[in-house]
Image: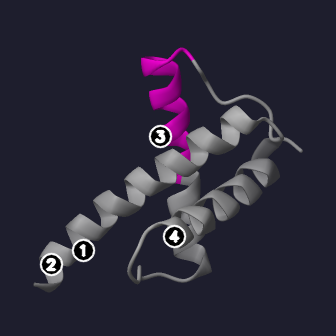
Amino acid sequence: MGGILGWIVLGLLAGAIAKALLPGKQAGGWLATLILGVVGALLGGWLGSLLFDAPLRDFFSLQTWILAIVGSIIVLLIWGAITGRRRA
C-alpha cells in the first residue's frame, strides 16, 4: 500500500492509536485525527532519520508504525498545550 492512500490510512490509524494511548480527552473528530496522524508520521519519520538514522520504510514495517505513532503523540501533546492555553 503506497502513495497518498497509504499515508492517509497510516495517519488515521497512528493518530487514533496516539489518542488512545494518551490519558484524558482530546478534542477533534476523525478529520483532526487524520491530520494529526499524517503530521505525526511526517514528524516521526523526520526525527527518526535525523536522530537514529531510521527513516520511514514501507507501510507494513514496524519501524514505520512506531515512528508514526510516536510522532503523532508528540504532535498531539503540542496541540493540547497550544489549545489548552487558548481556552484558559
Q: CA distance from mark 1 to mark 2?
A: 5 Å
- Mark 1 vs mark 3: which is more N-terminal? 3
Image quadrant for the C terminus?
bottom left
At 24% from the left edge and 74% from the top edge, which residue is drawn? Answer: 83
Question: Which residue position holds label 2?
Answer: 86
Q: Which residues are magenta?
A: 39-53
Q: Name the side, left or right, on which 70 lies relative to 25.
A: right
Question: Which residue position holds label 3?
Answer: 43
At 57% from the left edge and 39% from the top edge, which residue is drawn? Answer: 67
Disc number at residue 19? 4
Neighbourhood count class around disc 2 (C-alpha, 10 Å): few under 14, some 14–19, many 20 upward: few
Q: Are marks 1 and 4 in contact (CB under 8 Å)?
A: no
At label 1, which amino acid type do we have?
Thr
Q: CA distance from mark 1 to mark 4?
A: 15 Å
- In the rendered image, residue 63, in percent from the top left (x then y), is placed at 68, 33
Q: CA distance from mark 1 to mark 3?
A: 19 Å
Question: Which residue position holds label 1?
Answer: 83
